[in-house]
Image (tube, rainbow, N blue to C red):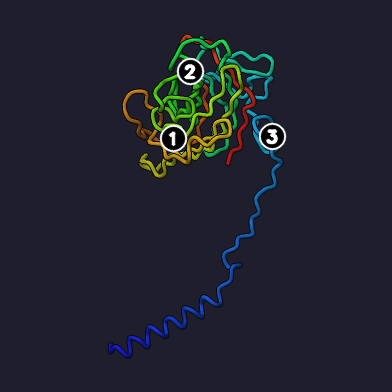
Amino acid sequence: MTHKLMMTALLAGSFFMAQAQQKAKPEDTEVWDPAPKVVTPGQVQIAAPSDAVILFDGKNLDKWVMTEDRSKPAQWTVADGVMTVNKKTGNIETKDAFNDYQLHIEWRIPANITGEGQARGNSGIFLASIGKGDDGYELQVLDAYNNKTYVNGMAGSIYKQFVPLANPAKKPGEWQSYDVFWKAPTFNEDGSVKTPARVTVLFNGVLVENNVELLGPTQYIGKPSYKKAHGASPIKLQAHGDKSEPISFRNIWIRPL
């Protein structure tokens, strides 16, 4: 092609491109349907929104079972609208299983807490429980108010994986909250990972985990990895074996997505 013909082709292409751009409109990329469902929001750290599933309303543990034997009802203590860990009975988890969700949960370190480091109000919220014991993906619960420990194991951490972006912990005796946005992992037919789990966490309203991509379920020793495929899973609360006073929970609700 001669230089003159090439220039003519380029000019013609530019002309037709300009014409196409002139015909395009903002409305072409607007999405109107389906409209998101109208939801009545709750107040921060207090009321659940209108479409939430209430997991604990302060009255009973009907939505929970023992992790080690799911045929047994949860055996933690309920009094004055609060559930308190019973370390003698073990972990509890939801009767129902979930994939993607938004979770709100409030927790309190006892005002008379003793111990230090990991032995000071230790518990955990397993965002997907995939077996007995402490199998799953753990969001750490711990006294983080003037309590030194390894930072990938402090409150707000995805235990042994991601350090929280900030430490907005309150004093022992005060109620605290997590708001969790969980994207469950998916797996191929051969059991390999298709999409890893992702999670965003607000700790007392402060962003501490920003859409982090999990490396696998929590691993206390060694590096985490996805060893087995799983589907929808319960949410588990940990009865940690430390000797400090047991922590409490209240106002737990979930919005499956």
Q: Secondary structure at mark 1?
A: loop
Q: CA distance from mark 1 to mark 3?
A: 34 Å
Q: CA distance from mark 2 to mark 3?
A: 28 Å
Amino acid under disc 1: His
**In the figure, residue 192 lies in which quadrant?**
top left
Classify the position of the N terminus by image quarter: bottom left
Q: Against 17, is 199 above or below? A: above
Asked whether 27 or 203 is in front, the reply is 203
Q: Position of residue 211 (x, y in %)?
A: 47, 41
Nearer the observer, disc 1 or disc 3?
Answer: 3
Identify the disc placed on residue 122. 2
Amino acid under disc 3: Gln
Q: Position of residue 144 (x, y in %)?
A: 49, 22
Q: Earlier in the sequence, mark 2 or mark 3?
A: 3
Mark 3: give few (<14), some (14-19) or many (20+) Cα within 10 Å: few
Q: Secondary structure at mark 3?
A: loop
Residue occupied by mark 3: 43
Q: CA distance from mark 2 to mark 1?
A: 27 Å
Q: Against 209, is 140 above or below? A: above
Q: Secondary structure at mark 2?
A: loop
Q: Position of residue 83 (x, y in %)?
A: 62, 17
Mark 2: give few (<14), some (14-19) or many (20+) Cα within 10 Å: many
Identify the disc placed on residue 230. 1
Amino acid under disc 2: Asn
Q: Which residue sits at x=69%, y=36%?
A: 42
